Amino acid sequence: MSAPRTTVGPAGPPAPPTRQSPAHTRAAFGFLLPFGLLFAALFLLPIGYTLGQSLYRVERSGLGFGPSRTVFAGAANYAAALKDGSFLAGVARILLLGIVQVPVMLGLALVLALLVDTRSTRLRGFFRLACFLPYAIPGVVATLLWAFLYLPGTSPLVAGLTSMGIRVDLLSAGTVLWSTANIVTWTWTGYNMLVILAALRAVPGELYEAAELDGAGSWRIAWHIKIPLVVPALVLTGTFSIIGTLQLFTEPVILRSLTSTVSADYTPNMAAYQAAFGANDYGRASAIAVLLALATCLLSFSFLRLSARLTGSRVGR
């Protein structure tokens, strides 16, 4: 018996979209409600409160000893922050740190990830743990450890350099920024390495096998296959590093107790802290926080756009 023939006719009009029942809609809102409440309470509300605080200032009478009153200041707090030479110097200082430290840190993380991912590397687990261990140490403890390595009286590094005739003060005005960069690099390189290593492990092994059959060595595989495929991970770690650099606070605050070269407004975050808890000027502190948030968004967005453009042009070639 022959199979019955089926005639394919012209496609009819698309079926109308099915409407969700009210019960399904209520269930969806019920699942989203806890997240919405937490998002509003822990994210939107603090942002709105900070924006509101930045538009007011506190005035005191009687040479500062009289009663205080809160008055509307408009953009005066923003103008005062942007005219403050110390704040602008802190911004320039942190930008210089990011331009130098972030590429060095990501380059080290990439090299370590490639070395750990190499098949011929022994003791992979040990090296992976050893690189990640600094990130597991709290930032305050890590800064204190490095601070003792920077102090001339307790540092074997300074003693060794002095014995070779090299006299250096690792906490001087010209070197304390790079001493801070060293602490940040030591702490975060292992974390970024694990992110890049996870991207490397997601690469199909068939690509490596095909490259080896074509006669490609380890260096060519790394340069032409591994590095291009982990570019998204590098962009992700780069974005996080930019955000973290602009929010630098713990390391300079700890070093400030050991040297006078770190001022109270050494970084923008420290300037906001000093304005709020040192001068009791919460309006100016809020304005600095808003400016810092805007700068973080602008730099992160610019980095993402530049990375997308460079990646697209490379793919096009």
Image: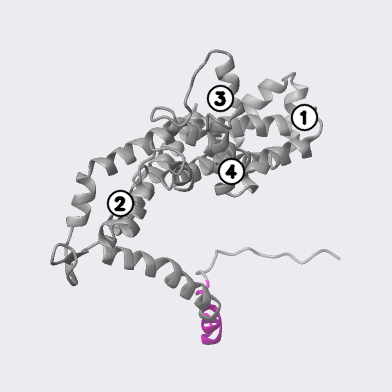
**Circle 2 is placed at which residue position?**
291
Q: Measure how far apart labels 4 and 3 are at the Cα level.
A: 18 Å
Mark 3 residue type: Val
Mark whose residue sits in front, 1 or 2: 2
Q: Are marks 4 and 3 in contact (CB under 8 Å)?
A: no
Q: In this view, does 66 lie above or below 292?
A: below
**Is any part of residue 102 visible from this angle?**
no
User: Few, some or many C-alpha atoms within 10 Å of disc 2 (few <14, some 14-19, many ≥20)?
Assistant: some
Q: Is mark 4 on a helix, strand or loop?
A: helix
> Quadrant of the rendered structure where residue 54 is?
bottom left
Q: Nearer the viewer, residue 40 or 217?
A: 40
**Circle 4 is placed at which residue position?**
142
Q: Measure how far apart labels 1 and 2 are at the Cα level.
A: 50 Å
Q: Which of marks 1 and 2 is nearer the N terminus?
A: 1
**Circle 1 is placed at which residue position?**
209
Q: Are marks 2 and 3 in contact (CB under 8 Å)?
A: no
Magenta span includes 147: no
What range is drawn magenta here? 15-28
